[in-house]
Image (tube, rainbow, N blue to C red):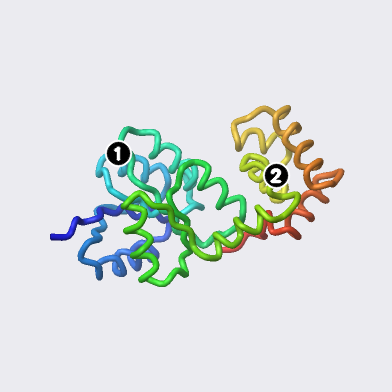
Amino acid sequence: MLNTIRILLVDDHPVVRAGMEGILASQDDIQVIGQAADGREAVKLAAELQPDVVLMDLRMPELDGVGAIQEILAVENPPKILVLTTYDTDADIVRSIEVGASGYLLKDTPPDELFRGIRAVARGESVLAPAVAARLMGRIREPGDEMLSGREIEVLSLVSRGNSNREIAKALHISTATVKTHLIHIFDKLGVDDRTAAVTVALEKGILRLNRR
C-alpha cells in the first residue's frame, strides 16, 4: 500500500489551484487536503491540517510566500515546502532557499517533473528546476554578484521598484540606518556609486529581473 503524500496548495489564483488539484488527482500517492489563497491562510491551514508538503506560490496578498514559509517552518515538526511559482529572479530564489524551502519549481514544469519533485521533497531531498539551478550556478561563477547576500538582494529589489530608504526599512522591518549600510555594501560589491547604477548593473548581471507574471 502506497504512503499518501498530503498536500496543501497555496496560490492566490483560484483557477491555478483548481488546475493544480486536477493534475495531482491523477496520482494515487498524492492527495490535496487543503487550499489557501494567501500566505496568512496558508500558515493557519498548515497548523490545522498538518500536511506533508506545502506547494507555495510567492507573490500573494496578506503575507507573501517567503513570510509564510518562515512562519510555517517555525513550528514543531513542520511540513516540507516546495515553492511553485512563475518567478525565477535571483532575489526570489535566494530568499526562498535561505528561509528553508526544500525545493523551487516553476509553474511551467511538466506534470511528471512536478510529481517527482513532490515525492523527492517528501523524502527529505532538495529539488530545483533546471533553470533555477543554472541561475544559482551562474551567480556562483560571477566574480561580483555572488557576494550579495539574500538581504542585500531584497534591498536592491525594493530599490528597483522605486522605494525610498524609509519605505524599504518599513517593508523589511529594519532601520533606515541598516538600509543605508546595505546600500553601501551593495555599491561596493557592484562597483557603482548610486542607486540607479546599482539597479542597472544588477539587471545586466541577472541578479534582478523586471517583474513579470
Q: Mark 1 points at which residue?
A: 47
- Under mark 1, the amino acid is Ala
Q: Which residue is drawn at 53% across and 42% down?
A: 98
Please give left or right for residue 114 compared with residue 206 in the image: left
**Which of the two discs, 1 and 2, labels the residue nearer the N terminus?**
1
Q: Where is residue 162 in the image (x, y as percent from the top left)?
A: 72, 48
172 to 117, vertically: above or below: above
- Residue nearer the viewer, 136 or 181: 136
Image quarter for residue 3?
bottom left
Callout 1: SS: helix
* Residue furthest to the left: 1
Image quarter for residue 167?
top right
Image quarter for residue 47?
top left
Give the alpha-carbon distance from disc 1 to disc 2, as whole Å: 36 Å
Callouts 1 and 2 close, C-beta under 8 Å: no
- Residue nearer the viewer, 198 or 39: 198
Please give left or right for residue 49 compared with residue 121 in the image: left
Q: Which residue is drawn at 39% across and 38% down?
A: 73
84 to 184, vertically: above or below: below
- Residue nearer the viewer, 83 or 115: 115
- Under mark 2, the amino acid is Met
Please give left or right for residue 177 compared with residue 129 in the image: right
Q: Which residue is drawn at 41% across and 72% down?
A: 110
Q: Position of residue 12 (x, y in %)?
A: 43, 55
Q: Name the residue under label 2.
A: 147
